[in-house]
Amino acid sequence: MSAVTRKIFLLSLCCFFSCRAFCWGFWAHQQINYLAVFLLPPEMLVLYKPQIEFLKEHAVDPDKRRYAVTDEAPRHYLDIDHYGNYPYDSLPKKWSEAAEKFSEDSLKKYGIVPWHIQTMLARLTKAFKEQNFSGILKNSAELGHYIADAHVPLHASSNHNGQLTGQKGIHAFWESRIPELLAEKEFDFFIGQAAYIKDPLVFTWNRLLESARAADTVLLLEKNLSRSFPADQKYSFEPRNGLILKQFSSAFSTEYNRQLNGMVERRMRQAIFAIASFWYTAWVNAGQPDLKHLSGKTFSDNDQKEFDDLNKGWQAAAKMIGREE
């Protein structure tokens, strides 16, 4: 193997492992959870602020679980276009009605994210009522992940990675490359305070339908830009996660973001607000328990083993279970 061939091989290998390890992407999910903490009232900050690094780090646990748990993948998306055209009235919004009409197995085949968000909200509310330190934080971190996923347009499309239109890789491009490149330099995350959500199911469906309506724009603008952008400038080798990788170039990414008219920033902001508001809603629905006595607690040995086992299983897994994005 020549030196040039070896270099290309190593770069390609780096691309594979980096995408698998960090392909919203790990960085964006973690930042969204982190920023959501600052929207909470003081009565909740007493617990959430000291645990902000936990909420950030464990925002990606559901993605890690996709490498180990068969039923995990459908919790992250809904191929809503399978059910017809916007506003998809053929699909009941309540789980019991949807399951009766289509069966649970069929629903899981095309994704269940709006309903799983309600399940996670109920778990978090229960944890607040029981003053369960571990349950509050673990469910908060993971609820944040699913809510953020519902704000990604391609999580509401059967063409979830551009695989049907010759645009494979657009999923990570939209939810990973653009936030990592531009969020800290250009995005505004001054949002305000969390709000009580009177009807979480309706709120979730409204956000998911917004994602579904935006999916065609995400795909069309990238395809049109690829046609007009100089082919030799679309990709570049740039640093990412400590490696030099082939990825969409900064110039191409910046222009795509401009043509999206701030969509990625807007959806990140909406996700941050929604997550903080769901945390707040769970706390209110639990009777606004005093959290001060939980602020000094730590995770049990069993909790730590659970986290360690998840990390070991994820790192050892050959590939994601279910569809890859």
Image (cartoon, rainbow, N blue to C red):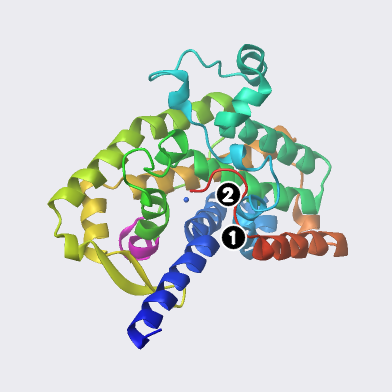
Residue shown at 47%/19% (left/top)?
A: 83
> Residue 149, how many percent across, how many down?
51, 43
Q: How many marks?
A: 2
Q: Who is closer to the viewer here, 212 or 285? A: 212
131 inside magenta stretch: no
Tell me the mark number nearer the camera, choosing from 1 and 2. Answer: 1
Give the residues drawn in magenta, as a range.
180-188
Q: Is 187 contained in the magenta span?
A: yes
Mark 1 is on which residue type?
Lys
Name the quarter where the N terminus is drawn.
bottom left
Q: How crowded is mark 2: few (under 14 residues within 10 Å), some or many (20 or more)?
A: many
| Quadrant of residue 315 within the rendered picture | bottom right
| Image height of 118 relative to 242, above or below | above
Question: What is the number of the mark on residue 108?
Answer: none
Q: Decide which of 269, 40 is in the foreground and name it.
A: 269
Q: Magenta residues: mostly which secondary structure?
A: helix
- Depth check, front residue: 324 or 136: 324
State the separation of the CA atoms marked 1 and 2: 15 Å
Q: Name the residue under label 2.
A: 40
Q: Mark 1 points at which residue?
A: 56
